[in-house]
Image (cartoon, rainbow, N blue to C red):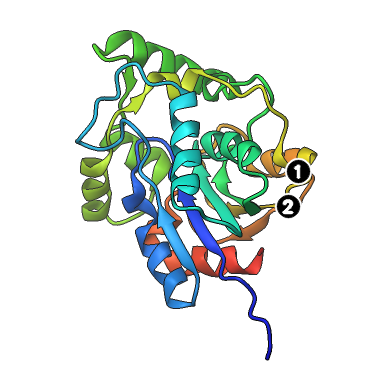
């Protein structure tokens, strides 16, 4: 008899303002190719919970609890955008269960540096939004979709996505991790960079360098997982 390699499970962590729905097109393609896929929606980013008072630790705890609750092993932890924060924090706690961490146009957190501290302009916008909202959140509107997240995409699609975005808990953006990059604890990692991404707080190559890897560059903007999911699914499997 030939031993079969255990099936890998992709645990997909969304970026700011997004839910698991943002990963669903990619998840469907991965499952169609024989992998398992779990697209997470983090606390405060669905209509059945409040974003008020949540911090980064809540997002990290949620990723960890979902993996442990399902007793998942051979996990490929894939994250998008701000999702690099909870994915990195969770990877440190799930090292025995995680086979690889893949950052897709995502932040690779620097130790002690929050999302708001990665980019001075973004930081000012984030802090002003937190101060100006009753629940200390950071909203994103159609202007952010059109100008930064999905420039050049069809207007009806931009409008639809803008209606799906929910305000990001402020603590998610101002809290930091007191942890090194996952490669420094021996975890395998890769970086996938969308070539036309102008939304990242820093150039994607800088984030990849924090892992000590070169990025795999693919076509598309920050939301390529929604507009061209086959490209992202192929990239995830290429860097496995």
Q: Quadrant of the N terminus?
A: bottom right
Q: Residue at x 30, y 26 (%)?
A: 139
Q: Quadrant of the C terminus?
A: bottom right
Q: Which residue is mark 2?
A: 188
Q: How many marks?
A: 2
Looking at the rendering, which quadrant does residue 169 occupy?
top left
The image position of residue 133, as x and y in percent, is: 26, 13
Is residue 228 something that shows in the picture? no
The image position of residue 21, as x and y in percent, is: 31, 52
Q: Residue at x 35, y 59 (%)?
A: 24
Badge 2 element:
loop
Mark closest to the chain's N terminus, 1 or 2: 1
Badge 1 element:
helix
215 and 172: which is toward the camera: 172
**Crowd tier of the residue under label 2, counting other residues whose Cα lies within 10 Å: few below 14, some 14–19, many 20 or above:** some
Q: Which residue is mark 1?
A: 183
Q: In the rendered image of this protein, does residue 158 appear above or below residue 57?
A: below
Say if mark 1 contacts mark 2, CB within 8 Å: yes
The image position of residue 105, as x and y in percent, is: 55, 47
Furthest residue in direction front, as rendered = 1
Q: Residue at x 42, y 76 (%)?
A: 32
**CA–CA distance between discs 1 and 2?**
6 Å
Q: Residue at x 61, y 24 (%)?
A: 177
| In the displayed structure image, the side of residue 76 where residue 30 appears, left or right | left
| In the displayed structure image, the side of residue 34 where residue 155 appears, left or right | left
Furthest residue in direction bottom, as rendered = 1
Is residue 145 something that shows in the picture? yes
195 and 208: which is toward the camera: 208
On residue 76, the disc is none
């Amino acid at each position: 008899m030939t031993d079969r390699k255990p099936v890998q499970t992709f645990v997909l962590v969304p970026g700011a303002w997004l839910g698991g729905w943002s990963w669903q097109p990619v998840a469907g393609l991965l499952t169609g190719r024989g992998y398992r896929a779990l697209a997470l929606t983090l606390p405060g980013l669905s209509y059945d919970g409040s974003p008020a008072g949540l911090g980064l630790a809540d997002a990290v705890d949620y990723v960890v609890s979902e993996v442990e609750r399902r007793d998942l092993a051979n996990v490929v932890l894939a994250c998008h955008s701000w999702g690099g924060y909870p994915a990195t924090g969770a990877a440190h706690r799930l090292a025995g269960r995680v086979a690889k961490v893949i950052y897709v146009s995502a932040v690779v957190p620097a130790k002690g540096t929050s999302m708001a501290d990665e980019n001075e302009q973004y930081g000012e916008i984030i802090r002003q939004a937190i101060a100006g909202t009753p629940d200390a959140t950071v909203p994103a509107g159609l202007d952010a979709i059109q100008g930064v997240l999905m420039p050049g995409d069809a207007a009806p699609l931009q409008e639809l996505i803008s209606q799906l975005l929910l305000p990001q808990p402020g603590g998610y953006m101002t809290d930091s991790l007191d942890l090194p990059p996952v490669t420094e604890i021996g975890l395998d990692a890769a970086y996938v960079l969308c070539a036309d991404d102008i939304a990242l707080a820093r150039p994607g190559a800088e984030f990849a360098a924090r892992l000590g890897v070169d990025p795999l560059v693919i076509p598309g903007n920050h939301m390529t997982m929604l507009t061209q999911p086959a490209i992202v699914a192929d990239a995830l499997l290429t860097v496995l």
